[in-house]
Image: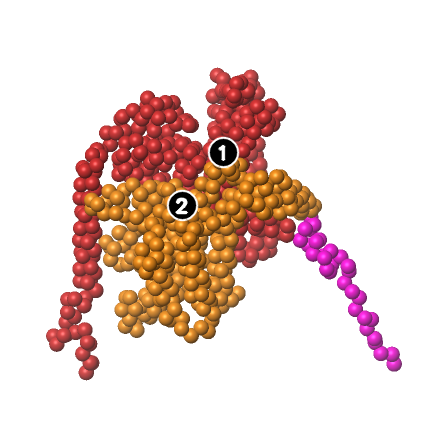
Chain colours: A red, B orange
Amino acid sequence: MAAEHPSQDSTGKVPLWRQPTFRAIVFQVLLVLCLLAFGNFLLSNTLQNMEQRGITTGFGFLDNAAGFGILQSLIPYDETYTYGRTFVVGLLNTLLVAALGIFFATFLGFFIGIARLSHNWLVARLATVYIETFRNIPLLLQIMFWYFAVLRPLPLPRQSLSVGDSVFLNNRGLFLPRPIVEDGFGLVVAALLVAIIGAVLLTRWARRRQEASGQQFPAGLSGFVLIIGLPLLTYWVSGSPLHWDYPVLGGFNFRGGLEVIPELAALVLALSIYTAAFIAEAVRSGIQSVSHGQTEAAYALGLRPRVTLKLVIIPQAMRVIIPQLTSQYLNLTKNSSLATAIGYPDLVNVFAGTTLNQTGQAVEVIAMTMGVYLLISLVISLFMNWYNKRNQLVER
Amino acid sequence: MTTHVAHPDLPPPSTSIGAIAWLRANLFSSWLNSLLTLGSVYLLYLTIPPLISWALINADWVGTSREACESGGACWVFVGVRMNQFMYGLYPETEYWRINLAAVLLVVLMTPLFIKRFPWKRWLVPFVLFGYPVIAFVLFSGGVLGLEYVETSRWGGLTLTLILSSVGMAASLPLGIVLALGRRSHMPIVKSLSVVFIEFWRGVPLITVLFMSSVMLPLFLPEGTHFDKLLRAMIGIALFQSAYMAEVVRSGLQAIPKGQYEAAQALGLSYWQSMGLIILPQALKLVIPGIVNTFIALFKDTTLVLIIGLFDMLAMIQAALADPNWLGYAVEGLTFAALVYWVFCFSMSRYSLALERKLHTGHAR
């Protein structure tokens, strides 16, 4: 005779309040009710407070004239444009700094990460010192260092540091020659596109041929030659449809050329140096995650070191590196909001700063700003899920 | 009959032992490596000697005004003169002893925790976590026991940095654990709420969170509620970091084999018992490096409060740089700040390595 289970009553049934499903439902209903009550409390307070302070609601303010200037804008902008336009200007500036930062951080990060694994003792130590230094100092401090301690104290435009009379660096920023595109330049761009498509097709064909016959074809090298060579050839044939506009010193500052304001330079420097330290660690962990047996097996099969690296190590390491890399890209994009500390006109500075102060519509402005960043992270994480699914280790 | 007598062993070739062998193996193993070594040495030659002469040899250490700085090297006088503000912010000078006392008390309370065989740990830990913050708050804020009242807007410097980060750490770990458990819960509403909460905070930059807490929290609360600026920043930081903490803890929970969950259930343990006694102790041990990394990120992120007008150490340094008597010493001020932050972050990461090694009870490879 089995002893009666303590949670069963005399009829042998489990009472309702001891059933996991019932308890889960009750708990969740209570949770939702609490949250609704809390949300209602916040909402009613907010509405009441806004009414008392005379804050208007809604997105109508986006059509009002902004009436303030912005230091740097990628699209035409002056005081007469609307608040909606300030949002776009800020957003573009954020994307610009993020794109530049990602570009430089990737190169620097891969370089340092590989150096960290070098067999050369000194090189590996230097890379370690770089990583341990820059990732343990707050990013905001690094941005301020580049801006206040390095770029601000540079000489005046008249005493600029210059490289070959075409690149100038002074406390007003960095001045580079600006490429001016002429009529025939479209052809060069078209040639570049054709070359890229050709290189991709070539790589595919080479892989298929190798899988079918084992014969190898130097697809990487020939693709590289194609991508560099074809546009250059077109450029030369179409009569060099490009000239450079050099910055010239006039009055108190340089005119012409491409101006990089010091705020942008400091931000890109700090973001890429800081993020590169993290990318380097990602690269190192990715390469180290490939077990040494893989290398030995490849050598045993007679693959040469270079081929082993290309066909065995890198594909497996990338599976570990890419997710970490994308999360670093995301961090870099979010960290670019620190621009506001040195006055670079990014989304947070222009929109959640000046526009918010002028209109007072905190809820709408903050919601729009957060929405942008949320959207970016959502898109990137969707991409990540797709990538992970595609590159999952297929185990048998 | 002649016996075979072995010759004494010859010493190994001089190029395969000692310093020369090490150099050949590690610095000059191929022409490329030799080139890299020479390049690195040149790089070091270009940077290190000028740095040492600027920071140490040619630097000015003693004095009270900028006239003391004329040797051309670093002007540490600037940092020395401002040191009290960097450490204590705008706290009244006569009351510094209260901060010092709190710091000494913390050290005295914490030291036994690092002694392996200290007997009263089970009483000390709750006291450090719950009793000490009350004592520290009373000391910092005053207003009772005859202590002068110091409002939070005058707290600042390294003190504020440490207060913000320790409160953030103490709040974000438990919150993160709850969120991680919620995300792995079988209850659909709890799970989706946790996912939304975590992904929301992870998707936005901390600055917007701080902006939100400084402009929107006052709107959320009933008319006339006074909400301290420092407290708002703390709430923002704690919520933000708890989302990151939740993901770290979740990765630990996922690493625990299913058998552990099933064994706990088979023993008749309730959900909270099995989590608290079986799963979490193992999961948290696994993710110590991740937790410490989150703590380091939190510590670095406290610098952002300067943007909403709190005076942490970096903000005090920035304020000092704008002092008309000391213009042009940005490098010294920011280098000092970088050094302080670096020491804290680096020692945290080393401590986590040591802890990881100590708690590694599995099979060492």
In the rendered image, residue A293, in percent from the top left (x then y), is placed at 55, 58
Q: Which residues are magenta?
A: B1-30
Residue at which label 1 appears: A265
**Callout 2: helix, strand or loop?**
loop
Identity of the residue drawn at 83% across and 75% down: B5
Looking at the image, which is closer to me, B197 or B30? B197
Q: Chain of mark 2?
A: B
Three-letter amino acid code of the residue under disc 2: Phe
Indicate whether B142 appears above or below A228.
below
Q: In the visual, does A394 lie left or right of A247?
A: left
Task: Please tell me whether the stretch drawn in magenta is mainly helix, strand or loop.
Answer: loop
In the rendered image, residue B259, in percent from the top left (x then y), is placed at 35, 67
Give residue B311's mark: 2
Three-letter amino acid code of the residue under disc 1: Ala
Q: Is residue B10 magenta?
A: yes
Q: Chain of mark 1?
A: A
In the rendered image, residue A290, in percent from the top left (x then y), is placed at 52, 54
Nearer mark to the viewer, of 1 and 2: 2
